[in-house]
Every structure is written in structure tokens, then in C-alpha cells.
Image: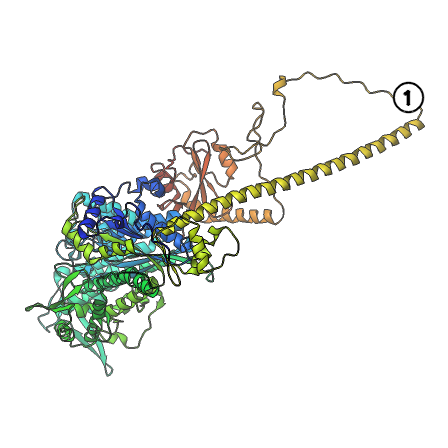
Amino acid sequence: MVSLGDRRPPPGDLASLSELDEASLLGGLRERFLGQQVYTDIGDILVAMNPFQPLPLYGREVSERYRHPQTGTLPPHIFAVASRAYHAMQGHRGGGPQNQCIVISGESGAGKTESTKLLLQHIMYLCKGNSQLEQQILQVNPLLEAFGNAQTVMNDNSSRFGKYIQLRFQKNTVRGAKLSEYLLEKSRVVQQDTGERNFHIFYYMFAGLSSEEKEIYGLLDPSLYRYISGRFGTQDVAQRWKQKYQEVCNALDMVGFQEQEQVDMQAILAGVLSLGNVTFEPEERNGSVKVSEASRGWLKAAAGQFGVQEDELLKCLICTMSVTRGEQIQRFHTQQQAEDARDSIAKVAYGRVFGWIVCKINELLAENVDPEVELSEIGILDIFGFENFAVNRFEQLCINLANEQLQHFFNHHIFQMEQAAYKEEELPWETITFNNNEPILNLLLAKPLGLLSLLDEQSAFPQATDKTFVDKLNSSFKGNSHFQPGRGRVLGFSIIHYAGKVQYAAGGFLEKNRDTLPANVRGLFINSITPLLSLLFKATISRTGTLMPHVKAKVIPGADDKFNSTRKQSAGAQFRHSLMMLMERMYSANPHFVRCIKPNSQKEPGVVDNQVVLQQLRYNGLLETIRIRRDGFSWRPSFEEFAERYGILLIKPGVSLTKESCLEILQSTELTGWICGKSRLFFKYWHQEQLAKYVERLERAAVVIQKVFRGFRCKKSYLKLVAELRAQAQQLQEEAERERSRQLAMEAEAQKRISLPVPMPRKRRPQPCPHPPDKLSQPPVPRPRSKLTESTPFDNFLDPSVPRPVLGRDEQTGEEGKMRKCKRGATLRWFKETQAKKVIQDDGAFPSWLHGMISRREAENLLIDKPLGCFLVRISQSRPGYTLTYRGEGRCRHYMIEMQPNARYVILGEDRAHASLTELVRYHQTVGIQPFMEILTVPCGQ
């Protein structure tokens, strides 16, 4: 066994604290946070504290600096997490290439969503790509935040759903992305507690739509709508929402949503708001209910916005039609049933719109590669944080269940797997105890007597109520230390979670779990004249609750005759299946952890509440994590893996994959603190970085050797070629001399036969030179390509008095010429048929900056004498699209303008889409083009 040596972590790491107790840990976190260090490390685990304010240099105006994390303007610790995951996926950190996942956890308001955004930016930077796909992936977050986030008492931008983003890579370049969403809190659409708001998108629409657009969608003053509780905000807030709405519209354009789809989507959202204002009152004649006179207009508006008949929508709200023995029976609802039907329609409509957005994103960002090609993957999990409100409902139970599962995943990887490996290898190790939450998971998920199983059982009984469900729980979990019955007359129960005790109000549990849709609604919406609404209700729902628009639901004869016939799996069962699939993905990947901490409960910047932080440190097990990261060995490769990866350090061929080879490799380095077990080696987390530096040093040496050898080989080949050419030239010269000698001999022989005198030619007098001796006219000489024109052999024409030659197009022959001519013809047809009418101005002329189909060199020649910032747009010669040529400092730049499938124009690498080419030009006359932030100034005239 090798000596342990220096076992201290690197400086700055929380695991390097001299005293390992709660007070030291709290003091270390507090010191770093108040010193503007939002992120810090515990070994290879990142700890983040929400600053409750924008991070330094956060926003569009510094977006270019965000692309270069090595400049120090970005949090370096979170960049390290992205870098570790990216390089581990490639197999650069020991072992072979492997899928990675980054798990971001913490309670609501701890900063998980912001950390996810930064991670995505960093990973896109590491790809070093410049495709539109990367910009589209980055635009997914603002889009999902608008439709899936809302203000709660704990967080102004709380994720009301969970998401798992899978980035797919081929040869280290991102080729696609897939998004999975979990448990959208649909009940928020119809009900919000005090101090909370509905989903952001409703407020963004009211702030961002113009008066004419609001009239088109049938929207009135926001204070009139019950579902947003009449709360709208101050003028400053409204202005910020207006800007957010523009960002959402741009994100929809960038990702690729069609204009008609966006119109239909906003019409459905307007219909949801109008439906919420429909109220009911008793019908005196037959005891049924009717729509109140005051809300008749709202019913008519909702029917118009949904694209259905008003009387058909009314029937779905106030009665149920059923057929018994061939006879149609109409059963009228009570007022409560009618209100439940109204709210159910609103929740289902919004939930399906959200599900469709996720499906559409997956379609547009799907990888376009051969299905047989194996892709690598990095997954990022950003899921709702642990919640404990004044009133906790079914949604909070599911959210806290997901957090229990993530805590178990963390414990499994950090404590259980690691300590089991020490015991198996018989290492000297003192067991670290941790808070194992497996009994809580059994309480919630076990079959057939777990809480969710009992909830499904009760939901299947039509006569069951929330009270019978609570009674069932009290009898089943009597004596369980993690369950407490409700006290007094409170209809509820308490669960002792890993993060503390949470009391749940059981009212509405059965109804939310059943997730029913009133009869006939599906048929009504399938026949809607709004294409998107029809598509949403033709789709089927998977076992995990995912909407599948391209898979039509099976139609069962007579299904609409039953009130609950459209009910699929319960909401709890769907969530359990989706959570199970998520955990399968994560267990099959190599995990990286980001633990988010909320510094205070008041959302105040620069304030650390010791008790709030200490409670999170305790239930997250961060003190135990520091101990195992300081004393443990997080990297445990087998002998074969290590020798295969690092055998190069011995600088000899044929290194055997044995224990002896591993020890020889390690003895050739200066590493200390590692242990050799029976079948594997045990390393500290920082050892990987140190070994990587050894390998990098050898790689640099190998590059130098390759450079010198290739130079020698090329020089040798060059000299050989020169010798051959000289030999050929000498041979040709000798042959020419022999031929000339033969010709002279023949001429001399002919002269002897002819006796007539031959006049001698007169000598020409030298002509006077028109130029000074130092300015002799010389032929054009090819010179290195100029930075400005990058163009032709005539760039550096030596005689300035001679006019610059006009460049003609090279005539190409053969197949290449035919293909080029064919592409040009296709592009011209594309412009005439689809673009000409869009670009032409009101006076019938094209804009002065549009120069038709000219070449790159011709564009540069036009701009060579123009001022800085001059520009033109030309039609591409090789593809349907445009290129913007810009006169920059000392050179011309060429920016590709891409036409997206939804007819939007975007400069490749930019994060904004435009409805027209003219709008694109106007926008960049005020906002610079990335990455050099160049502003268009003067158009180049035709």
C-alpha cells in the first residue's frame, strides 16, 4: 500500500476547512457569499447561494463576454462543473466516454433555474460551434419560463414543473436536444394563494400585446379576469413584462414556431381567461344551473376564442349526456359540479398547450444524424425545489417526493456506493453515517400500501372522498415514525421529510389525482375551427403524462357517454412513471451535483440568515459530504481502466493492464494521497486534474515531435521534388539545345547550296523609356491575399497608374460547372418566387442595400473604398438565403443570413429572429452584430 501523503484538498475548497463542524462550514459559506462568491466547491460538488440580484455582467449587452468564461467575467466554479461533464463525456478524465448528468437541487428560490442557464451557456461555449442550433437551445429556457414559471411566496420566478434537458453530441459538437417535463402545476391556472400569481405568460400578454392585437384576441382590461385575480402590478413591472413578452415572441421565432401556431396558442390562452369569468346560478324551475346573465358575454367570448359553438360549450358545463339501453339521458350539474367542469376545461387546455410546446421544441431541436450513429449525452436536471407553504396540497406532495428521490440519488452516489467500495476493497475506513431517507420513499412509493397506491385505490371508488382517503392513511401508517395524522378536525396529515416536517391539506387530493375531463369536451374541441386546439385534443397521453400530438388517441364507441370516460391514468401514477424513467436515465449516467442554498427567506440581496442556511446544510448532509470528500476517494478506476488511460506516462510501448503497471505509472509521477486496493485504485477528486496535466504535457511534447517530423518530411519531399523538377528542366534544356544545333546545322547546309547574297538585318536603336528606371512596367504579380479584399491576383497591382482590372466570373466546365449553374438557377427561382415581393419597397424598387446575386469578391470590391460600417446584402450563390457583407476595420466580414422554416430571418449565431429582411437591417443599425458588435451605418448603393 502506498503512503497516503498529503490528504488536504486544494485551497479555497470548503473541504479544506481546518475545523470540520457546522459553525466552521457556516462561516466559510458566509465569508465567500458576502465576498460576492456565489459559487464554491466541496470537492467535485458545487455549492451555490442565490444572490437575489443579477450576477455581474449578466444580460445581452455583455453577451459576447459571457461566451468567453476564461476571461473571468463568469462564475468560474460553475464553468468547472460544465467543463468536467463535457470532458468526462469525451473520456478525457479517466475511463472511456460516458453519458453525463448534472443534478441541480435545493429548495424553492435557491437559484436552480439561474444555475441551469449558466451551465447551458458554458456547455455551448465549450462546443466551440457556431450553428443556429446552439442559439435555439439557449432560447428554450426563456420560453419555458414564461409558460411554466410563476411567482410564489418563496420565489418570484418559481419553476412550477420539472425539466430534464438532454444535449446530444457527435464528435464533441452538439447535434440536437431533447426536453422532458414533469408535473406541471395546472391547478395554478384556476387558483392562486395570497401573494402568488398565475403563470407569467398571462401577464406578459397583457403587457406586450398592442390594443389592436388585444381586440383581435378578445382581451379586455386585466383587472376583469378572475384567473389572474385582478393583480397586475405597477407601471415599472408592466414595462418589464412587456420586454419579457418580446423575448418570448423572439424565442418562439428562433426555435421555429410558425406564425399561425403562435396566433392559435394565444387565442387558446385568451379563451382560458374568458372561461374563468363564467359564473353559474340556480335554475328555479327544475333545480338545475344556468350561466348567470352577467357572464353570458364571457361564455360567448370563450366559445369564439376556442373556435366552438356557444351552445355546445354551455352543454359541457351544465350537464352530462349519457345513453342507457339506447335512451339518451341528460343529467344536470349542481353549481359546484358546473364550476369544477369549467376549471377542469381551463386546466386541461393550458396543460395541453404546455405539453405541445415541449413536443414542438423536441421536434425542432431533434438531431439530424444517421439513427445508427451513437451519440454522447449530457443531461441537466432543473426540477422544482422542496416546498413547505402555509397550505400544502397534492402538488407539494409530488414536488417533495421528487426531492426525496433526488436526495436518495445523492446519498447513493456520495455515501453508499463509495463506502461499499471501501469495505469491498478492505481499506482502513471509519464509516460516515448519513440521513438515509429510504423509509420515506417506501412510505410514499411502496406497492400496494404506499401513499400513492392508496390514493389510486381510493380514486377508483366513485363514492370515495378525501376524508375516506385520510382515514385509510391513518389506519395504514399507524405507528410509522415518518407519518403523523392530522390533529383535531383538520382534514390532513403530516410527513417527516428529509428536509423537515410538512403538513398537507387533503382537500382536493382525489379530484386532482383523478384529473377528470368533462364528457363531450374532447369531441367538442376536436371539431374546433382553431387548428391547434383540434390537434391538442386529437393527441394521446403517454403513461408518463407526455402529450403525443402525432399519435391519435383511440376512440372507444360510446366513450363520451360517461362522465369519467376520458380519464386516463391518474396524475399520481403518471408522475410515478415519469419519475421512475428519470431515475433510470440518471443512474445510467455519471452524475455531477450542484447543491443550491437559499441565504434568507425574505429574498433580500447580501443577507445571510444563519438559521435558514444551517437548516439547509443539515438536511442536505453537507457536513457529512465534506467529511467524505476530504477523507474519501471519489475516483475509483479499475487497474485496467487506469493503465489503458495513463499507460502513455511510461513512454514505452506495450504497457500491460495490470496492478504492477499502475504502480509503475504512479511512481513515475509526484502524486500523493492515493491508495491501491485489491482490484482498483482510489484517488482524491483533485488527482484527475493533476494526472490530466501530466498527459497534457506529453501531448504537447508529442505535438512538437509531430511538427518537427512533419516539417522534416515535407522539407525532404520538397527538396526531392525540386531536384526532380530541376533534372526535368535540365533534360528539357539539353533536348532544346540539341534540337537547335540540329536546326542550325540544317540551315548551314542549305546556305551552302544557295549562292545568292543574303542582306544582313539592321540593328534596332534602343527606344527611349517612357518611365523612370525604378518604375518599369511589370506584369501583374500574385501577392498574398489582402486582408481587406481577400481576393485576387490583382490585389497588389504594382502600377497604380494602370486602372484596376474588372474581374470576370471564372468559366467552369464539366460537372462542377453544371452543378454550380444549377444551384445559381435554383437560388434565383427561390428569390423570384418567394422573396421578391417581401423585399420590394412601396415605390416598386428594391432597397439600396440589396445587390442581387453577386460574388464575395465583387461585394468586397464594391466596399473597398467605402467608409467603416458600410454594408450590402447579396443573394447567396450556393444556397437559398442571403449574405450580409460589412466593411470592417481593415477587412470585410461576411455574415450568413438564414431563412428558418417559419419564414423568419436570423444572422447565424445571433439570438434574435426577424419577420423581414428590412426589419433585420433596421435592428442591426442600432444593435451590433455579435461577436464584434458591429453596427450597420451606410448602405452601399447599387
| Residue at the image position 27 percent from the left and 41 percent from the top | 56
Q: Secondary structure at mark 1?
A: loop
The N terminus - image quarter: bottom left
Residue 467, by quadrant, is bottom left
Q: Is residue 550 left or right of residue 710?
A: left
Nearest the viewer among 747 and 634 is 634
Kind of residue indicated by mark 1: Pro
Q: Residue furthest bottom?
A: 325
Give the residue number, with chain letter if any, for mark 1.
757
Residue 369 percent location from the top left of the image: 46, 58
Q: Is residue 921 above or below residue 672?
A: above
Residue 518 percent location from the top left of the image: 22, 70
Nearest the viewer among 626 and 231 is 626
Q: Is residue 526 above or below residue 193?
A: below
Would residue 557 be visible to someone looking at this image?
yes
Classify mark 1: residues with Cα within 10 Å, few (<14), some (14-19) or many (20+). Answer: few
